[in-house]
């Protein structure tokens, strides 16, 4: 069937901000969809609140609405754009849920819009666990026994049937929010109410546990002609009980015979047909009993999912792109396979390598969170790797994690002198309980002589995986025995074939990485590059999508074109996410336009940068010195760009340069000046710029001395960190000593930086681009929250909303001075703090920053593209960018946090970054823009109701102003005693409410009873923080908008005032730029 | 681990490691792209005369079991993989790949860059090769590969067909129960020519309600008809259809006298019987992901395939039956003919493997079609 002609305009809904369970894979899928539909001549309208996405680039769609992803926005857009169709299956759960809500509200009918991809009944059948269960029973598929609870009482009844442990799974949540495993009645009583809370429809499925069974996923595609193909099978190394998103997974399935695999394949086809997803991709999960082979269906996602992104990268089959084409009526046999060109998409990819995905976690940022892995997803990113064997693939994946681990080094911390028996005792619980570290403890356990059989019995992990680990552990022992003696070339080759990194080999053999590399070069033990071609080499691959291995034949076939290599950002983590991939992709686009061959290196399967058609050549490789140098050896690029991928490639800059790699853009030495405290200080002194008074401490005593000299409070942190790792504000010596003891182990190599803490200072972010001679400001962003809240966590406004023009001019002048001083070529980001009119420089990042995409969306200036061209030798003059663009409209960025996923974690904002994503609100004044940003971030600001206020003394007068304005707007004010007294004195009508420890009913009860619509709470000091913790936590879990800073509250009030006067409209980027 | 060598007729030598049986073996080297089902591949008699290289690198993970055999013993001449697993991990496994190959006397070689080998076969075509675990002189092995008898024109069927007729009794497989034994005999009596028949074809026929008698490849049309069959089935099998003229002759005599269904070699033999010629593909189709379109419905089925020879379409068109024969299925990758039927005679055949095993079940409906054909002709 040819494409539909009754449709000409299509609305695509994006996934909104990056949150746990929904990362940049939906930018990858959304971008592919936009491209695909444009190609087909459709007019594409896009809704997505996430400015850091490629899909929201103005060229991707005809109309790009960076507005909150809500039914309201959908309605306003439909009203203006009148598309015939809405494609909801490429924007994750958010898009799907938004489309469903819009349909429920009759909005789609009202504007005669058709859902394409998946129809409403299909979505309900798949998402509503009860309907799903019925459907599966209809087609004779087995499921875990289960029942459906809307209350604790119901839950208890169901558990009498399914027994403990019981799996709790709320309906309509993503990443399993609110899910959990109850092992006993007490846990059930605690978890059920929370789960009901998490479910937008107040529903939980309670299931028989199949913990320990083998877990599989199949990626299925179906077209209008009912052709169905399986794109990829994925097997979890971590058995059932650990969310697939948190599991180490491999593709293809490794431990199924054909008979068993085909049974699963038949089931998957039956499922997609019964659910009735008429076109596109779906993800279906199965569990298999390792003892009997009994297979049960776990769930189906009637949309492109995180695993679809993984499957696309793993096979080279562009699921999202094809899904989009199927949605407009094409059949699989009508769509060509881009990689082979001559064969059609109606086939099942076969792969001739092993793919491994390892999740990346962020527990170091949430010390109070429980790192045990369960059925609710907790990881924030992932790396994927390919190798000819599992051993090679797995070890490459480990090296890709960038967690200072390049192989299966011992996971213990300080175990000097602990006996082997003792370690053996200690290791067992660490393999029994799933955690981010389990993989490494498994290998350690094998080293300690625990048998693979024992491990299988304890963990349920398939013996085949354990045997692989056992062989690696055994070979490590062999290697260690060889330490000192010259390494036989055959052993060296075997080690590389098994995926051992040079660093790991060095550790085992007592050699430096460089020495191992030299040994490899001497013996000609070098990697070759194989192509990912969807067909196991049966047809010729036209696209250079490559991975390294130590097999015989190389297929890299480098060209002799002028080429530039761009190093990506690796796995997403808090502090380094999609923003950096956005910059990499823009770098690629710009350099392609400029006629260079572009070479992308990255290992993050969620990204647009790892799409085979983003760069001319893609190397899916770990971002380590070893792997990058080997690619350079093959490709010989004339330039390598390290400033787009965040801290990851920046960390490699010096070593790469030392190895003779041509780094283009700002020189590694300048980068070092910016990152080295002493050198940076000299620069500022030379330029006559101010910095907070500061010192460096190499021991606790030095720190205490420095702090005394500077005066408390001080900001302390280890040097060379991103995202404010382990950064704290300490108010007195005792706290400082604790910090030095617990948070960091200061040493001459790892000094600790001690800065004067600038109280009540306004923080300002500036992005600029420089060609070495001319510096142009990209944008000046005034933060809403005061300095002390990490720049990545605070909301900000472009242009500034309160700073005076002279101050802004001076900030720009200083920025330019530093850019020239550092001889920046490319991008630079500066963070300033303005305290009573004095400007302090907090830090300079001589690279693309988190805010570059936001600035580009706000101003319409493609900063990263310009930077790439500049790095390739052009001048800003020649590129026609010589003056800053200051838009008339206001853009507000707001951060989005994962707190709700981590029980027991406080929501206070600190200098340590905790947000996973961001949203953008655009409008013609600050109030509206801020309001939009809040809505987009999920904080539905009330237009009326009750505000709860409880603030520390310093903030009381500010709080009074805020309260007064809210009263003027008709709000009721309730407050804790101290605050209430102060407000009353200011003659603001206020009602007292108990603190948690003052007896009941207290503020928590009031919030739970829905009697608070807005919450405003500031605090400091360990005790006060602890006392008020439950207030913030309850607000979070009951979705009450809360603000923990004065500035945030002020902004919220101005937003509420705007909201009360007029509804929020929508307007596309194209119109703003127009 | 013991050293082994794979030498190809074009002079390429691949060093690797021995597994399974030791010794020396020669055969035509082909690659198979199935990611699952190495046991079914190994036990498929169609591989007589050939050595199989698996493009998927990890082989043997699930070990071997009693149920997944496609014939009573292995016929493949050699087995070439990247990494072979001696430690089976599967609830049905009864033996390791290594032990099984050793018992069956099949020489295996691992540590081979099977992707490089596949690329060579793709560009230069299937070629003869030798695997040796004893003689490790590459040049000598290359000579042996060159002098090994090629597949073309050889009668490999004789070496794999059954000695005497026998009745088949088991039907399809289900987890837990294993293979079903139909309670009452099938409604249609089918005579199945065994050119190297895969068990799963017989299971599928039985499951579809046929009462199957398997006969040797050399059975004459008269002897076949003497069994008063409702239908005749022409099976898959190894090598060159032109190497088994007696089979084509029998088929020719059966044309129009009884419903006929042919698979793979059976399809080629039917083509010869209809007066067409057969040709050899460069490297054939061997895998479980080949897209085939049913021209009647437009539906795409993902098929399991294993063949180097095909019916030559122009010659079929030119043949006496040219106008009567219609192409029913085509391969969407290379547009080769995958199925045909006769407008007057009750017969049809496919080049691929609807019985799968290994591979997708998309085409199982064809066994139903055969039954309908017999119904209509009854
Ligand atoms: N009945 C069960 N027993 C044990 N583990 C389960 C069960 N159901 C789900 N899980 C685990 O929980 C994870 C999440 O469940 P899933 O249905 O996939 O929800 P989500 O929508 O979050 O992906 C699965 O990946 C699996 O590991
Ligand atoms: N001297 C200071 N006074 C007040 N706040 C500070 C000071 N130094 C840093 N901060 C706060 O800590 C945050 C993180 O510090 P920064 O130097 O930017 O580290 P990172 O490299 O993680 O961005 C800043 O965004 C700012 O809000
Ligand atoms: Mg899931
Ligand atoms: Mg910063």
Image (cartoon, coloured by chain):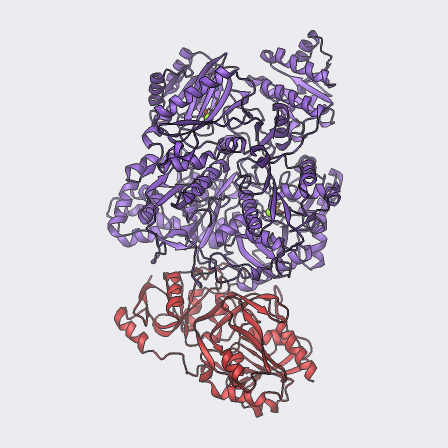
Side (left or right) of A946 relative to A556: right
Q: Quadrant of the C terminus of chain A?
A: top right
Percent x, y for residue B372?
68, 78
Q: What hue does chain A carry in this figure?
A: purple
Residue B24 in view here: yes
Q: Quadrant of the N terminus of chain A?
A: bottom right
Pick the front one: A948 or B75: A948
Pick the front one: A995 or A884: A884
Percent x, y for residue A113?
70, 46
Percent x, y for residue A430?
49, 40
Pick the front one: B179 or A670: A670
Side (left or right) of B11 relative to A333: left
**Extreme-top residue of the structure:** A985
Does A834 appear above or below A671?
above
Does A897 appear above or below A677?
below
Pick the front one: A328 or B189: A328
Q: How many callouts does the rendering have?
A: 0
Residue A736 in view here: no
Does A958 appear above or below A563?
above
Percent x, y for residue A1025?
58, 20
**Chain letter of the red region:** B
Does B201 appear above or below A253?
below
């Amino acid at each position: 069937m040819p494409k539909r002609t009754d449709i000409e305009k299509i609305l695509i809904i994006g996934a909104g901000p990056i949150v746990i369970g929904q990362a940049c894979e939906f930018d990858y899928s959304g971008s592919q969809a936009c491209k695909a539909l444009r190609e087909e001549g459709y007019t594409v309208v896009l809704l997505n609140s996430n400015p850091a996405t490629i899909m929201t680039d103005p060229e991707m769609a005809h109309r790009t609405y960076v507005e909150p992803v809500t039914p309201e926005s959908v309605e306003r857009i439909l009203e203006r754009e009148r598309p015939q169709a809405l494609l909801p299956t490429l924007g994750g759960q958010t898009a799907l849920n938004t489309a469903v809500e819009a349909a429920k509200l009759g909005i789609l009918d009202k504007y005669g819009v058709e859902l394409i991809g998946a129809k409403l009944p299909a979505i309900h059948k798949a998402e509503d666990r009860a309907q799903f269960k019925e459907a599966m029973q209809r087609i004779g598929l087995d499921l875990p026994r289960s029942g459906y609870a809307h209350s604790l009482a119901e839950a208890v009844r169901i558990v009498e049937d399914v027994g403990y442990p019981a799996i709790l799974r709320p309906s309509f949540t993503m990443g399993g929010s609110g899910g959990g495993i109850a092992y006993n009645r007490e846990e059930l009583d605690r978890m059920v109410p929370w789960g009901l809370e998490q479910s937008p429809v107040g529903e939980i499925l309670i299931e028989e546990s199949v913990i320990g069974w083998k877990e599989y996923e199949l990626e299925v595609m179906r077209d209008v002609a009912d052709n169905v193909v399986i794109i990829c099978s994925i097997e979890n190394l971590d058995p059932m009980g650990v969310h697939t998103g948190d599991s180490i997974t491999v593709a293809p399935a490794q431990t199924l015979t054909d008979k068993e695999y085909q049974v699963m394949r038949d089931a998957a086809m039956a499922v997609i047909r019964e659910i009735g997803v008429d076109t596109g991709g779906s993800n279906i999960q199965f569990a298999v009993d390792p003892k009997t082979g009994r297979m049960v269906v776990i769930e189906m996602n009637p949309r492109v999912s995180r695993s679809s992104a993984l499957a696309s990268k793993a096979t080279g089959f562009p699921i999202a792109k094809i899904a989009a084409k199927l949605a407009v009526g094409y059949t699989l046999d009508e769509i060509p396979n881009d990689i082979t060109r001559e064969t059609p998409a109606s086939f099942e990819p076969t792969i001739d390598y092993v793919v491994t995905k390892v999740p990346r976690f962020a527990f170091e940022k949430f010390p109070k969170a429980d790192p045990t892995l369960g059925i609710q997803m907790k990881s924030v990113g992932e790396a994927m790797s390919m190798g000819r064997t599992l051993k090679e693939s797995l070890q490459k994946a480990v090296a890709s994690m960038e967690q200072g681990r390049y192989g299966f080094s011992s996971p213990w911390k300080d175990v000097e002198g602990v006996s082997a028996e003792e370690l053996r005792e200690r290791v067992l619980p660490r393999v029994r309980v799933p955690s981010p570290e389990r993989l490494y403890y498994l290998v350690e356990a094998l080293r300690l002589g625990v048998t693979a059989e024992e491990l299988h019995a304890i963990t349920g992990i398939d013996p085949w995986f354990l045997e692989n680990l056992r062989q690696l552990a055994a070979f490590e022992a062999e290697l260690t025995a060889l330490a000192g003696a010259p390494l036989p070339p055959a052993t060296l080759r075997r080690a590389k074939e098994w995926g051992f990194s040079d660093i790991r080999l060095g550790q085992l053999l007592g050699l430096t990485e460089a020495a191992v590399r030299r040994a490899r070069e001497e013996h000609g033990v070098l990697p070759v590059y194989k192509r990912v071609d969807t067909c196991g080499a049966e047809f010729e691959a036209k696209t250079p999508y490559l991975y390294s291995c130590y097999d015989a034949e190389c297929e890299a076939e480098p060209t002799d074109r002028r080429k530039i290599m761009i190093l990506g950002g690796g796995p997403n983590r808090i502090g380094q996410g999609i923003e950096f991939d956005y910059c990499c992709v823009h770098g690629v686009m710009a350099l392609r336009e400029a006629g260079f061959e572009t070479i992308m290196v990255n290992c993050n399967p969620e990204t647009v940068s790892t799409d085979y058609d983003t760069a001319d050549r893609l190397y899916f490789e770990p971002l380590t010195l070893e792997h990058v140098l080997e690619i350079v050896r093959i490709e010989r690029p004339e330039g390598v760009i390290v400033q787009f991928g965040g801290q990851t490639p920046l960390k490699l800059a010096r070593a790469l340069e030392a190895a003779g790699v041509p780094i283009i853009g700002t020189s590694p030495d300048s980068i070092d000046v910016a990152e080295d405290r002493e050198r940076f200080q000299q620069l500022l002194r030379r330029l006559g710029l101010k910095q907070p008074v500061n010192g460096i401490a190499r021991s606790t005593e030095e720190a205490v001395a420095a702090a005394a000299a500077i005066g408390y409070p001080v900001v302390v942190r280890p040097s060379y960190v991103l995202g404010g790792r382990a950064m704290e504000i300490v108010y007195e010596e005792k706290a400082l000593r604790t910090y030095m003891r617990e948070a960091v182990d200061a040493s001459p190599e790892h000094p600790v930086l001690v800065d004067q803490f600038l109280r009540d200072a306004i923080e300002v972010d500036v992005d600029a681009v420089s060609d070495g001679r001319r510096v142009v400001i990209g944008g000046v962003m005034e933060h809403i929250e005061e300095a002390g809240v990490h720049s990545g966590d605070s909301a900000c406004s472009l242009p500034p909303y309160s700073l005076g023009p002279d101050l802004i001019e001076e900030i720009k002048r200083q920025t330019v001075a530093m850019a020239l001083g550092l001889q920046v070529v490319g991008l630079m980001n500066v963070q300033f703090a303005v305290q009573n009119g004095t400007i302090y420089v907090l830090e300079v990042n001589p690279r693309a920053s988190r805010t570059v995409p936001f600035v580009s969306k706000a101003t319409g200036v493609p900063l990263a593209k310009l930077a790439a061209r500049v790095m390739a030798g052009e001048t800003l003059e020649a590129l026609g960018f010589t003056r800053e663009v200051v838009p008339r409209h206001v853009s507000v960025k707001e951060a989005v946090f994962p707190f709700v996923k981590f029980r027991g974690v406080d929501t206070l904002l600190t200098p340590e970054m905790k947000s996973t994503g961001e949203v953008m609100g655009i409008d013609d004044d600050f109030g509206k823009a801020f309001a939009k940003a809040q809505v987009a971030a999920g904080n539905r600001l009330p237009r009326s109701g009750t505000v709860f206020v409880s603030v520390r003394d310093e903030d009381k007068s500010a709080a009074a102003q805020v309260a007064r304005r809210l009263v003027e707007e008709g709000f009721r004010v309730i407050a804790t005693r101290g605050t209430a007294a102060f407000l009353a004195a200011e003659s603001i009508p206020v009602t007292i409410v108990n603190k948690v420890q003052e007896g009941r009913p207290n503020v928590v009860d009031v919030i739970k009873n829905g009697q608070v619509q807005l919450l405003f709470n500031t605090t400091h000091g360990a005790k006060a923080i602890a006392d008020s913790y439950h207030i913030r936590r309850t607000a979070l879990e009951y979705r009450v908008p809360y603000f923990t800073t004065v500035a945030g509250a002020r902004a919220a009030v101005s937003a509420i005032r705007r909201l009360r006067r007029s509804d929020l409209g929508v307007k596309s980027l194209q119109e703003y730029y127009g | 681990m013991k050293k082994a060598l794979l030498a190809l007729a074009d002079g390429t030598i691949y060093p690797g490691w021995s597994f399974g049986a030791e010794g020396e073996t020669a055969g035509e080297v082909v690659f198979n792209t199935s990611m699952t089902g190495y046991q079914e591949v190994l036990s498929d008699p169609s591989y007589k005369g050939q050595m199989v290289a698996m493009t998927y690198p990890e082989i043997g993970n699930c070990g071997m079991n009693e149920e997944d055999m496609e014939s009573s013993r292995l016929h493949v001449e050699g087995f070439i993989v990247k990494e072979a697993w001696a430690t089976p991990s599967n609830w049905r496994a009864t033996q390791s790949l290594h032990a099984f190959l050793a018992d069956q006397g099949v020489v295996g070689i691992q540590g081979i860059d099977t992707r490089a080998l596949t690329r060579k076969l793709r560009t230069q075509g299937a070629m003869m090769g030798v695997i040796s675990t004893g003689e490790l002189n590459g040049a000598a092995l290359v000579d042996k590969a060159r002098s090994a008898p090629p597949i073309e024109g050889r009668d490999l069927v004789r070496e794999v067909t059954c000695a005497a007729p026998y009745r088949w009794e088991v039907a399809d497989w289900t987890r837990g129960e294993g293979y079903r034994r139909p309670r009452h005999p099938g409604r249609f009596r089918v005579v199945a020519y065994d050119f190297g028949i895969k068990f799963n074809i017989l299971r599928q026929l039985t499951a579809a309600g046929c009462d199957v008698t398997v006969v040797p490849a050399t059975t004459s049309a008269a002897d076949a008809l003497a069994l008063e069959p409702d239908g005749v089935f022409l099976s898959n099998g190894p090598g060159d259809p032109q190497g088994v003229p007696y089979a084509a002759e029998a088929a020719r005599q059966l044309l129009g006298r009884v419903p006929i269904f042919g698979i793979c070699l059976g399809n080629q033999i039917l083509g010869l019987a209809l007066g067409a010629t057969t040709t050899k593909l460069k490297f054939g189709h061997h895998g479980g992901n080949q897209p085939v379109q049913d021209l009647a419905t437009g539906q795409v089925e993902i098929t399991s395939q294993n063949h180097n020879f095909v019916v030559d379409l122009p010659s079929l068109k030119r043949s006496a039956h040219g106008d009567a024969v219609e192409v029913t299925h085509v391969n969407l990758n290379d547009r080769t003919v995958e199925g045909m039927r006769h407008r007057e005679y009750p017969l049809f055949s496919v080049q691929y493997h609807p019985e799968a095993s290994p591979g997708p079940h998309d085409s199982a409906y064809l066994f139903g079609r055969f039954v309908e054909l017999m119904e209509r002709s009854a």
